[in-house]
Structures are given as C-alpha cells and as structure tokens.
Image (cartoon, helix red, strand yellow):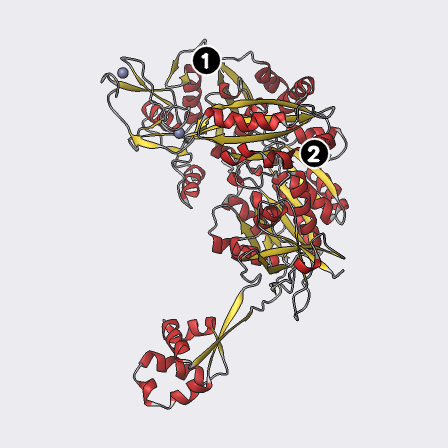
Amino acid sequence: MPKVFRVALDTPLRRLFDYLAPEGAGEPAVGARVRVPFGRRRLVGLVMGTAGGSDVPAERLKPILEVLDRVPVLDPAAVALLEWASGYYHHPIGEVAAGALPKALRAGAPSAALQENWSLSREGREALESAAARRAPRQLAVLTLLAGEDSMTADALDERMRGWREAARALLKRGWLDRTEVAQGREPSTAGVRCAGPALLEEQAQAVAKIGAALGGYGAFVLHGITGSGKTEVYLRLVERVLGAGRRVLVLVPEIGLTPQLVGRFRERFDTPLAVLHSGLTDHERLLAWREAFSGHARVVLGTRSAVFAPVPDLGLIVVDEEHDSSFKQHEGALRYSARDLAVVRAHHARVPVVLGSATPSLETLHNVTAGRYTRLRLLRRAAQAQPPVLKLIDLRSSAVRSGMATPVVLAIQRHLTDDGQVLVFLNRRGYAPTLLCTGCGWVAPCGECDARLTVHQDAGRLRCHHCGADAPLPTRCPVCGFEVKAVGQGTERVEEALQALFPAVSIARLDRDVVRKHGDMEAVVRRMSSGEARILVGTQMVTKGHDFPNVTLVVVLNADQGLFSTDFRAPERLAQTIVQVAGRAGRGARAGEVLIQSSFPDHPLLTHLLAQGYDGFAEAALAERAQASWPPFARLAALRDSAKTAEGALTFLTEARQLAVAPPRGVRLLGPVPAAMARRAGRYHAQLLVESPERARLHEFLDGWLPQVEQLKSARAVRWSLDVDPIELF
Ligand SMILES: [Zn+2]
Ligand SMILES: [Zn+2]
C-alpha cells in the first residue's frame, strides 16, 4: 500500500480524508495545508497525519494537488490540541481545524506576509526609448524609476512616488513590467525589559517562585488573589522569565478584559513585539496578527477566547486571566468549547505551565484544586496598603425606595461625594426601563419574535429587544386601548437620570453597551473617571473588569436579586462572582471602601454566606449544594439543543434522539427534552435534552455511540441542532 496523507477538510463529516502524495513535488509535513480534489470541488485542508494504507480502494485514492505550506501552520502540539477538541466536544475534525485558522488561510493565503517586487521587463526596457512611453507621463515616471534598479519592493516604490500603483498596473498589462512575490524577510525580534516592576509582596514573590520553578514542564496553577492583590504583576514577572529564556507566552483574557490598559502594561514593561487577537478585528487584521504570532516575531500573544488556537512557537507559558469569566466559553457557531479548559489541555500537550488567575475562581476550578489536579496559590493582601472593602446589605423591603435606590444608599452617596470620594453604581441592565406598561389595560410591550419584553430606550426614543435586536419607535399611547403608557423598572439610563436629579451639580458617567459603541468610547469614560471630572459612574458588567479607579470609595449594587432564583444552577455562582468583582472596585486607593448591596431577600443563604465568610465561604457552601444535587463539577453534562420554527418541531427531534437511547448504559441519565426557559427567541423555538453522568469517561463513551445515530435522524434535518459539552448556561 502507498503512504497516505490524512487530511482534515471543512465539512460536517466526522472523519479525515485520505490522499496520496502530490505528483512530482515534495510531500507535505503533518500540520501543513494542502489543496485537494473533493468531489467536483477543490478544497484547502490540513494534513493531520499519515498512514501506511487506507480503507479507500487504491484506485479511488487521489493525489494531493498542491502543498501550500513548506513550514506547517500547525506544530505537533497544535495538531494534538485540535484532535483532542474534536474528540472531547464531539465535533467534526475538519470544522475544528478550519476554525483554528484565520479566514484567509482557510482559503489558501500564504502563512507569511509577502513582499511585492517590481522590475522592468525586456519589453519595458525597449519601450522606455520609444515614443509610446512618452505619451503617458506617469507610466514613464515609473519606468524611469525602475530603470535605475534591478527591482524595487512595493514599500520602496511607496516611498519614492505617490500613486505609482495605477500606472504600474497599466504597465503590467502592457507587459512592460514584471511583478513577483516573495516571503517577507524580517529582522528577528528581541525581548527586552523596559523597566523593572515594583517590589513584590511576600505572597506575590512566593507565587512567582513556585510557578517559576515549574517552567519547562506541565503544571496547572490557580492564582487566587483578591482584587487589588497584584495578579497582573505576578504574570508580568513570569512572562519576564519566560522571555528571558528565549521562549514565548500566550495570555488569554475575557472579551471585556482586553482593555488598552492591560495591553499598555505589557507594552510598558516589555520591549518586544506583541500580537493582539480579539473579536473586534477585521479578517485582514486577524490575518496580520496571526502571522506575527506564527512567524515568532511576536513574543507575547495576547487575546480573547479564540486565541487559544493561535500559533506560538517555543511556547513557554500560558496565562488565563479572570478564568471564571463566561466569555471563555464559545456558546455559538460550530465548535462550542471552553478556551480555559483548552488552555489547560494545550499546556499539557506543550509541556508548559498554565496559570489560571481570578479573585473568584469558578467552582470547577476550585474542585480541581481539591482533587489535587491544580495547585492553588493565594494572594490575600492588597498591594499599596489598600484595605479590603466593608460589605453591607440594604433591605429593600424596609427602606423607602425611589427610582430603584433606597434612602440609606442615597445618603451614603451624598456622604462619599462630600468626602471627595467617587461612587460606582452597578446594575446589570442597560436601557431606561425593562418594561413599558399601559396604565389603563395592563398591556406590556412584547417582542414579536421572543418570549420577552421590550426594553425602553428613552434617549433614543426606541423600544428594543435585548435578545433578538428587534427595534421599534417608542409609543406614547397604548396600541390596544389608547391610554397612556409608562416605563416600569430601572435600567442604567434611568438610574443615571435619577442620580442627576438628586445631585444636579455632580458630573455623572455611564458605561454600558449603549454608550460603548465604537473603539475609544470606553477609554473616554474611563478617562472621565480617572481624571476625577466624573464623580459617579453608573454601569453594567463592563464596570467590573480591568479598570482601576483609586478614588472610588463607595460601590452600590442596585439589584442583587436577579441571580437568586434562576432556573440555572450556575446563577448563584455568577451572582457571587459579580458582587465580589464589583465590590473589589471600592477602596483601591489609600482609603477604605464601602459596598452597599440592595436586596429584597437579605436573608438568602447565598448573600449571608458571601457577606459573612467572603467568596471562600460562599464557594464551600455552593460546592456542597452541587454535590448534594449531583450537578457539575460532581457530574458531567452535555446538552443537545435545537431550535425550530414551531414548538413541536423543536421537541420532535429531541424526543426521537432520546428514544435512540431507551436503555442508556449504567451511570448515564437523560433529562428532558424540555423547552428552553425562554422558548421563543428571534422567532424560533428552542429546546434541550441533557445527558448526565457522574463519570466523564462514561458520558463520552455514550456520546460516541449515540451522536452518529442522532445525526442520521430524519428530524435532524428539520431543525438547527448542536451539542454542547460542559454547557455553562442551561436555559
Ligand atoms: Zn392599554
Ligand atoms: Zn426579541
């Protein structure tokens, strides 16, 4: 049998495809891209391995058409990571592999930047003397410029002559110029330290020493440090060591955490190229950043979720900052994965340490510490003598409440403003009000496409759905009875308005997705707070991350009750994390901070645990509850989800899928199917079927046998379905 190359192709089929070596040219290496025939099409694929034979009859095996990479775009650790992800998330390997590369590379673009070279052709040289050339002065100028050189790069031409390209293109058509492309050579980058960091506290130094000692091999470390304890400084010291050893670093941060401030801290400290990858990049920018990483020119690769797949030659360390953040989970699209979990797997394959940092580690991560899989390092002290804030509950039932604010809260804001402090007001709901109500007939403005109410956006004069994006003008009268309508409840926009009425002389800033629409908007708000021009900041989740406002002395959590009674077993964990993260914004300077949490259920055990014993006490109680109820991390879950145009349609596929497993193996339970808590979203009905097992291996063994059958169901074609392994939101 001839040697075959096993190629991953971007198709929904759960397999690799076998091809023969290309005719004539050299063989591709594992991890290289190749162009292959596939039916009537030609596709770009990735060589994932080789074999001594194939199940496909020899006469049907086709040769690879073209090898696109001399240097493979995936190193062996990357190939292993993709194979692992495909197996663990039960997703077709071709789609997993395709998703790991920028769009242009999937289409066959070169993995390195190319330099254009222009030179005069023989005809061009002759034409230079002719009268024909003299009729087009711009073209003549280009010809004359090139006549003096063997060839010139596009960059050099840019420098010498403006607007040369149009003329050059015309000359190329006439055959008077030659154009070639060669891989761009670059000076190798260096990694210098611009300035030494501040002196480390004892705990920081210990963490650096412990993780530093593990460099050169795999190890998973949880850097559990309270807000303000200097986790970033620990990362920076470790990065310094890794760069000093000539290796490179991958840093993953949450979507919202990739602030210019963080990038700035890396740039300030290190004199070395950085590649920054995030979801806001255009396809072209992504390609450029990927190339910077791939070539090794960038020595630090900093990015959000999908950067876990970024190429980092000579990887020495992976850092996952704010590891508990839900934006590390890919909820949509093809492959649904946890970038944090993949980072640990990648570190394992690459034999490097991984650091998971957080002030509020996820319960899964804490469980891994207890089980001895991860090592926890604690930072309990705040840097710069800052004191941890004092948390206090405000009972909404026993205080007068106006515009969502209890009297003691208003008085506290007044006091802190008088004392020259700044105030942060947190409410996880943007817009003016969550409900528009008719005072005559009780009509509530609904979204036509979702089982949800429309949110009032007063400034914009619109009603908007926060689930599907539906958008309509804000009515002044009820469309049913014609009576007056009024906005009920609070959003950040309304809280800002109420605060402005209470404190007319005070400048107030707001931070939410309605304010932050384009690049630079967030920095503008942050600047107003840092300069002290704004004294109060009202905002959503956005205020919890990455910004250091040393003069904030009071933090108000307007509504802690949203997470207390959710159907999702993870809601309390998210609420506790949010409260601790928001509270951490208080008193980061020299002054002690105060945190007021408004609730109508101040006796709820979640809140009392959190206030009495902090996040540790909460986590312990929450883990005990999860163990009792056999929820993750004490069980493993996978959710088979679908959506259809009708409620019945959504349930039919899942019911049939369940029937395929009438007698599931011992230790595997199927729960459902049930309609999603918000069944109708954007005009489609959603439902889910849960698969649960106390053991990971059993769950996956079951999925391996079950999914190929599920895929074959006729009803599968009538719905959009997906499998989510380790789902973090159940709805
Ligand atoms: Zn009405
Ligand atoms: Zn909607």
Residue plotted at (39% across, 28% down): 492
Residue plotted at (40% across, 11% down): 400
Q: Quadrant of ligand 2?
A: top left
Number of residues whose C-alpha sits closer than 10 Å to that of mark 1, classed few (under 14), some (14–19) or many (20 or more): many
Q: Residue furthest top?
A: 398
Residue type (three-letter) at the residue carrying disc 1: Leu
Residue 531 appears in which quarter of the rendering?
top left
User: In this orientation, which residue lies closer to the viewer: 169 or 40?
Assistant: 40
How far across and down, in percent of the image, does residue 349 sit?
A: 72, 47
Check disc 2 and report the residue beneath it: 700
CB of mark 2 near ligand 2 (< 8 Å): no
User: In this orientation, which residue lies closer to the viewer: 638 or 177?
Assistant: 638
Q: Secondary structure at mark 2?
A: helix
Residue type (three-letter) at the residue carrying disc 2: His
How far across and down, in percent of the image, does residue 43 sit?
A: 56, 57
How far across and down, in percent of the image, does residue 482 sit?
A: 22, 18
The quarter in which the N terminus is drawn is bottom right
Going by the image, does 722 lie left or right of 218?
A: left
Alpha carbons under labels 1 and 2: distance apart: 47 Å
Check disc 1 and report the residue beneath it: 396
How far across and down, in percent of the image, does residue 505 sit?
A: 32, 29
